[in-house]
């Protein structure tokens, strides 16, 4: 498949899929990860303009021992255009072998095709801290030189904690099974959540097996959010930032995200994001909202009943809690 920018979000491949109508560049539907099939392949608006063999021959090749197509590798992909005042600016995710892309997406692999190194880079570039590095320069494009200059620590004692969270966010289908196996560590089973929202569908973070299966990807919205919060804390601690500095970056440099956290992102007791259609009724009726009014069909065509109470989550408090957790863990591992 040939992906476009909206297919990606922070540590989230298959973030959106183009609708059949394709009326404009925002005619896309958000993926429902709870119902995503194991072998899902998103729709795309592009196809090769030549036969398969010519396309494979002409696609970018890299010299890794021998000349190999870039399509052979797991790669870190990112949106080229920099939305410096949006929710996020640095938007990266892992794409599997066979995935091509158009110019609004750029991608890279590690020179030795080392999967763990790739996932460390993925974890770092998914953080608010490195996003701030990019956003503060206020460029219109994010090119390879920008990624190359970012501070990334490969040998920190907390790296395996970072890798697990990055894997569970990115490995959303069986196309990522080999990446999961290549990065697998038995110590993943010792990992625990660093706090956050204890919703009804939450499972232990370390409840994972070596073979990839349907339980590997984080599917519930609150869990995906918490994994990103913990990545933020891990990267801040690894690079020597204090919890106060991390929270200041979030509060002062990511105003759109801060606003969404305060007013838009509501979660039900199952950790699901409550859609606007339900929220609008709830804001008028409060606890008097009926079960029928709490039921909605999402863009993927799946219907859920959202259970009260609806709550916003305090990202700043969660980052501080996660930071304290990893500080304790660092002392144990040092």
Image (cartoon, rainbow, N blue to C red):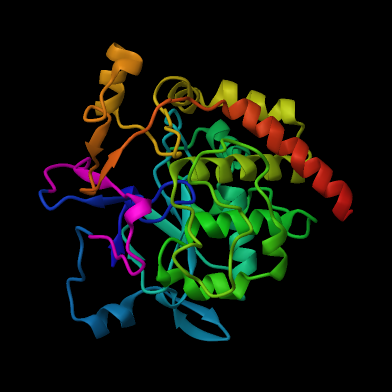
In the image, residue 41 lies in the stretch drawn in magenta = yes
For this orientation, the residue located farthest to the top is 284
Q: Give the image location of residue 173, x and y in percent.
A: 40, 65
Residue drawn at 63 percent across, 38 percent down: 129
Please check the rendered image and state whether residue 287 is part of the magenta-colored stretch, yes or no: no
What are the residue bounds of the magenta stretch? 22-43
Q: Judge left or right: residue 177 versus residue 314.
A: left
User: Residue at (79%, 39%) from the top-left corner?
Assistant: 240
Q: Measured from the top left, where is residue 91 in percent x and y?
A: 46, 46
Name the residue rendered at 58%, 21% in the picture: 252
Looking at the image, how many numbered discs can be counted on the residues? Answer: 0
* Of the pair 113 and 141, the residue shown nearer to us: 113
Q: Is residue 288 above or below residue 125?
A: above
Which of 12 and 311 lies nearest the eye of the viewer? 311
The quarter of the displayed image where residue 97 is located: bottom left
Q: Is residue 81 visible?
A: yes
> What residue is shown at x 46% (from left), y 82% (from top)?
68
Vertical order, 244 against 215 (above or below): above
9 and 207: which is toward the camera: 207
Q: Position of residue 247 (x, y in %)?
A: 65, 26
Which is the main secondary structure of the residues drawn in magenta? loop
Q: Is residue 104 visible?
A: no
């Amino acid at each position: 498949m040939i992906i476009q920018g909206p297919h990606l979000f922070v540590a989230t491949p298959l973030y959106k899929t183009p609708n059949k109508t394709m009326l404009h560049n925002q005619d896309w539907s958000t993926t429902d990860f709870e119902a995503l099939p194991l072998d899902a392949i998103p729709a795309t608006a592009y196809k090769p303009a030549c036969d398969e063999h010519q396309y494979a021959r002409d696609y970018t090749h890299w010299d890794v021992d021998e000349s190999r197509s870039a399509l052979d590798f797991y790669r870190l992909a990112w949106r080229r255009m920099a939305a410096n005042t949006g929710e996020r600016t640095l938007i990266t995710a892992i794409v599997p072998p066979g995935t091509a892309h158009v110019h609004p997406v750029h991608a890279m692999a590690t020179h030795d095709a080392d999967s763990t190194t790739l996932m460390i880079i993925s974890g770092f570039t998914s953080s608010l801290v490195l996003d701030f590095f990019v956003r503060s320069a206020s460029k219109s494009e994010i090119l390879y030189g920008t990624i190359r200059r970012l501070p990334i620590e490969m040998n920190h004692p907390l790296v395996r904690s970072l890798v697990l969270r990055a894997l569970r966010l990115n490995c959303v289908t069986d196309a990522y099974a080999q990446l999961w196996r290549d990065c697998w560590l038995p110590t993943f089973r010792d990992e625990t959540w660093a706090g956050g929202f204890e919703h009804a569908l939450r499972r232990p973070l370390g409840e994972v097996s070596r073979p990839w299966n349907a339980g590997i990807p984080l599917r519930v919205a609150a869990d995906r959010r918490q994994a990103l919060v913990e990545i933020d804390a891990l990267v801040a601690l690894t690079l020597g930032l204090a919890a106060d500095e991390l929270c200041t970056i979030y509060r002062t440099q990511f105003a759109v995200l801060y606003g969404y956290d305060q007013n838009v992102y509501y979660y039900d007791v199952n950790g699901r994001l409550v859609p606007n259609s339900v929220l609008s009724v709830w804001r008028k009726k409060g606890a008097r909202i009926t079960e029928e009014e709490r039921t909605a069909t999402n863009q993927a065509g799946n219907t859920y009943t959202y259970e009260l109470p609806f709550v916003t989550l305090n990202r700043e408090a969660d980052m501080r809690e996660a930071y304290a957790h990893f500080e304790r863990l660092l002392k144990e591992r040092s």
